[in-house]
Image (cartoon, rainbow, N blue to C red):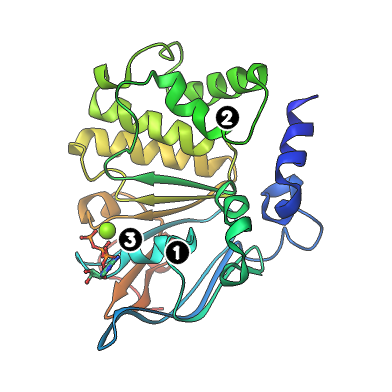
Amino acid sequence: MSREDFGEEGARPFAFFRAGARAEPGVANKPILVLEDVYKYFRVDQPTLRGVNLTVERGEFVFVTGPSGAGKSTLLQLIYRKHTVDDGRILFSGRDIARLTERSIPYLRRNLGIVFQDFKIIGHWTVFENVAIALEILSMPRRLVRARVAEALERVGLSGRGDALTDTLSGGEQQRVAVARAIVTEPALILADEPTGNLDPHLAIDVLTLFEEINATGTTVLFATHDHSLIAKRDHRLVSIDEGRVVESRRGLTTWAGGLHSVGG
Ligand SMILES: Nc1ncnc2c1ncn2[C@@H]1O[C@H](COP(=O)(O)OP(=O)(O)OP(=O)(O)O)[C@@H](O)[C@H]1O
Ligand SMILES: [Mg+2]
C-alpha cells in the first residue's frame, strides 16, 4: 500500500475536504471556509459572536486578531466543532459542519491541523511519539508512520530529533513538535490559536515563518493572535473581531497603504 493509497482511503468519507489535487472536481474552487451570520452565546444576554461573516479561500494566510475576550479562540473552536454555533452556518469545503454527526467529527478533524498557545504535547513522550500519535489514531501502518513523521520533523527543522524527550526541548522547539503533529496528517486547513503566545519575540517570528512555509505549500492557515508587533511585520490578510463581528482590517499590502492606516472591508 502506498502513502497515497492510504491518504485516499483514510480520507474517503470526507475526500472533498482535501486540498489541491486530491480535492474532488468542483470542490477545489469553493472557498475552504465560509462563516455565514454566525452567533455563539455562552450567556443568553451577551453573545460572544453576533453575526460573524467570513470567507477564506484555499491557500490564504489570515491573521485573526482582537482584544482578549473578543472571541478569537471561540471562532476557531467553532470550526473544529469543540462548540456548535447557536445560529448561522459554517461551511468547510462547502459542507455545513453543524450537520455533521458526532461520528463524523473525527473526519472533519483529520482535515484540520490545530496548534495551541501551550503546545499541548506530552513532555515524557519522545518527539517522534508526539507526532506519530496523530497518524496512529488513524491506524496507519508503522512503516508509513515512520516515514511521514520523519518528513514532518524535517519540515519543522527537527530532523534527527525524534528520540529526544520533548521535556528536554526549548519552548520554540516544543512548539515545532506541535506544528509537526498538526501537519503530519496533511490537513487542508491549519487553525493556530496564539501559537506564539508563550514564545519570546525572536522565537515568535521563527514560528510565524514556519507557518508561512507551510502555507506556501498550499495549506490554508488561520492564525489567531493579539500580538500586533507580529501582525505589523507581515502583509497577510488581517481580520479583527470587534463587538462580536468580524471586520476586515487589511487585505495584504495591495489595500494596506504601507501600514500607515488600515482599510475597512
Ligand atoms: N466555554 C466557555 N464557557 C463560557 N464562556 C466562554 C467559554 N469560552 C469562551 N467564553 C467567553 O467568550 C468570550 C470570548 O472568549 P475567547 O476565549 O474566545 O476570547 P479570545 O479572543 O480568544 O481571548 P484571549 O486573547 O484572551 O485568548 C469571553 O467572554 C469568554 O469568557
Ligand atoms: Mg484565545
Please, what secondary structure does the residue beneath circle 1 have?
helix
> What kind of residue is marked 1?
Thr
Total numbered labels: 3
Q: Distance between the Cα atoms at labels 3 and 1?
A: 28 Å
| Residue position marked by numbered label 3 in the rendering | 73
> Relative to 79, does residue 158 appear above or below in the rendering?
above
Q: Is residue 245 above or below residue 183?
A: below
The residue drawn where x is 77% and y is 40% is: 9
Q: Nearer the viewer, residue 262 or 136?
A: 136
Question: Dot 2 lies on which element?
Answer: helix
Does dot 3 land on a helix, a strand or a loop? helix
Discs 3, 2 touching: Cβ within 8 Å: no
Q: Earlier in the sequence, mark 3 or mark 2?
A: 3
Which tag is nearer the camera, tag 3 or tag 1? 3
Residue 23 spot, x, y in % from top left: 74, 52
Front in this rendered view, residue 121 or 59: 121
Amino acid type shown at disc 3: Ser
In the picture, the disc for residue 254 is: 1
Q: CA distance from mark 1 to mark 2?
A: 43 Å
Where the N terminus falls, by quadrant?
Answer: top right
Q: Check disc 2 and report the residue beneath it.
A: 136
Please tell me whether mark 3 or mark 2 is closer to you in this view. Answer: 2
Q: Is residue 156 visible?
A: no
Callout 3: 10 Å neighbours few (<14), some, many (20+)? some
Q: Say the numbered circle drawn on residue 225.
A: none
The residue at 46%/15% (across/down) is: 159
User: Which mark sits nearer the N-terminus, 3 or 1?
Assistant: 3
